Image: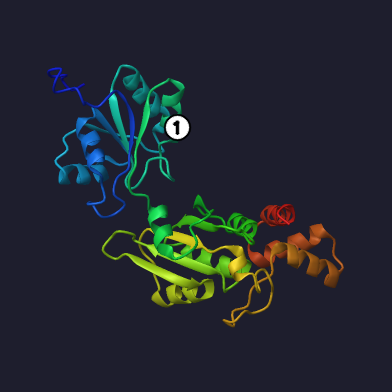
Amino acid sequence: MKPAGDASANRNALAPGLYLVATPIGNLEDITLRALRVLKEADLIACEDTRQTQKLLNHYAVATRTVSYHEHNEMTRAAELVLELERGARVALVTDAGMPGISDPGFRLITLAIRHRVPVVPIPGAAAFLAALVASGLPTDSFRFSGFLPAKRGHRRTVLESIQSSPRTQVFYETPHRVKDALADIAEILGPERHIVIAREVTKIHEEFLRGHAAEILETLNARGEVKGEITLLIGKGEESATGVGTSSSVGTGMPVRPTVRQRVTQIMAEEKLDEKAALKKIAKEMGISKSEAYRELQRSRSSS
């Protein structure tokens, strides 16, 4: 714990508690004066990666002690930190970039602190999904942020089917090595003319916004080869591109849209006189997914209709 000093000097000193401090998502200037004060006055900074956070601390001459807090040690470290908090410590929680708890570690510590009646104080700042949303050009009156799209193709397609007619802008994080596959699924399931925005490296030197139809952006990324950087994927409202969505025809771009699992089940059962179980087995092989994934996608499609 840091020395208390005299009473007058500590009249506005940081009170004990857990402080959720937003850090820059790229540009080091995107940090608030309040965040810097909290980081300097805290007894301890819990970091997703101490090496990454140390770059920020060195830049602003912050000498506060750091400790690691990440997805692999949060179960034990959360308990340790709450013990310190109960003794009156002032702990700042940060992630590598952005707001703690948003697709980053923090939830376990936050809920445990609340359960132990420890004050939890948000120190707002940069968030990649929000920065991408306001600059996307897509409607911001109603939106949903859902973290990362599922890595497995079948699960990802199920999620996309569930937002086919969504009345709000959908916001996801995506990895560079999966973004092309995600766009291909979007073009097939939501339609090649669905409005899409790829926000890449937001606030960094190579910041870029790709705005257009799903098929157009996929073509652009395919032409580039390897995709790099932090990516936020935004999908426009369903009613904006309802024509041709979820059909097996081509819409404007000449790119064929593959039918959904539900459409193929109906088609195969009618054309080949197969029962649903046999049709699902055939579809799973066609799409390169497991039979259970095909079944879940079918059920999801039915429940959302």
Q: Residue at x 29, y 19 (%)?
A: 88
SS for dot 1: helix
Left or right of residue 195, residue 292 in this image: right
Rendered-image quadrant of the N terminus: top left
Rendered-image quadrant of the C terminus: bottom right
Return the x and y of residue 129 as percentages of the image width and height. Answer: 42, 54
Q: Is residue 288 above or below residue 257?
A: above
Q: Which of 291 and 95 is in front in this view?
A: 95
Left or right of residue 37, residue 86 in this image: right
Return the x and y of residue 148 as percentages of the image width and height. Answer: 49, 52
Left or right of residue 195, residue 2 in this image: left
Q: In this view, does 186 lie above or below 35?
A: below
Residue placed under numbered mark 1 in the picture: 108
Figure quadrant of residue 87: top left
The residue type indicated by label 1 comes to Arg
Q: Residue at x 32, y 43 (%)?
A: 22
Return the x and y of residue 79 as percentages of the image width and height. Answer: 40, 24
Left or right of residue 211, residue 253 in this image: right
Q: Nearer the viewer, residue 291 or 210?
A: 210
